[in-house]
Image (tube, grey):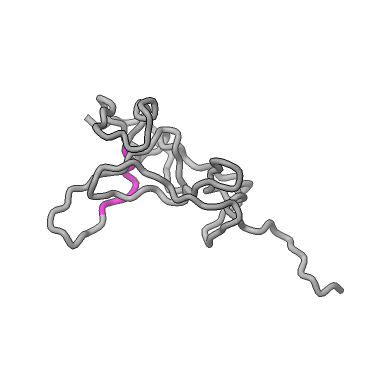
Amino acid sequence: MSDEAEETEETPTCSSCLHWQIRRPGEGWCARRAPVALTSESVAHWPQTHSAQSCGEHVLATAGVELVYCADCRFWRRPANGFEPTDREDKLAWWWEDAGYCHRQAPVPSSEPGPRTFWPTTHATDRCAEGVLELSPAREDG
């Protein structure tokens, strides 16, 4: 019998995780969590990780589960009149054409009285592990 432990499962790393979306070799972002409501308008940015990193919420990409695209999610709302942002942040004009708000997370209490809540903006092709498939046609904010 050998003293070396034989690996029977793939080592859990970001590169083998369902939640990880590669952007360039060795780098990508984790889409495990939906963006949270904020006190200022903002575009959602998922945390960047390296392919060899990992966490305790790893799910093998081959597990037969699929992430829900924002456009198909029951928590995603697209403004009826679209977006005309004053500050496009780091997004180009084409990105805003298919942008909407992620309403997945409820606002959290704050130490400041009466903060206004803004839901983060995401693109129709973004996706996360907390999305839920919409069963009826997409709704729009009026």
Which of the 4 image quadrants contains residue 66?
A: top right
Query: How many marks do you count on the picture?
Result: 0
Quick check: 72 left or right of 120?
A: right
Residue 102 drawn in magenta: yes
Residue 15 in the image, given as x and y percentages of width and height: 60, 49
Q: Look at the magenta stretch and give its main secondary structure.
A: loop
**Going by the picture, which residue comes out furthest to the right?**
1
Residue 58 in the image, given as x and y percentages of width and height: 55, 56
Q: Residue at x 62, y 58 (%)?
A: 12
Residue 78 drawn in magenta: no
Note whether 76 is above or below 35 in the view shown.
above
Q: Nearer the viewer, residue 79 or 50?
A: 50
Q: Nearer the viewer, residue 114 or 50?
A: 50
Residue 95 in the image, given as x and y percentages of width and height: 39, 29
Q: Nearer the viewer, residue 24 or 133?
A: 24
**Going by the picture, which residue comes out furthest to the left?**
113
Magenta stretch bounds: 101-107
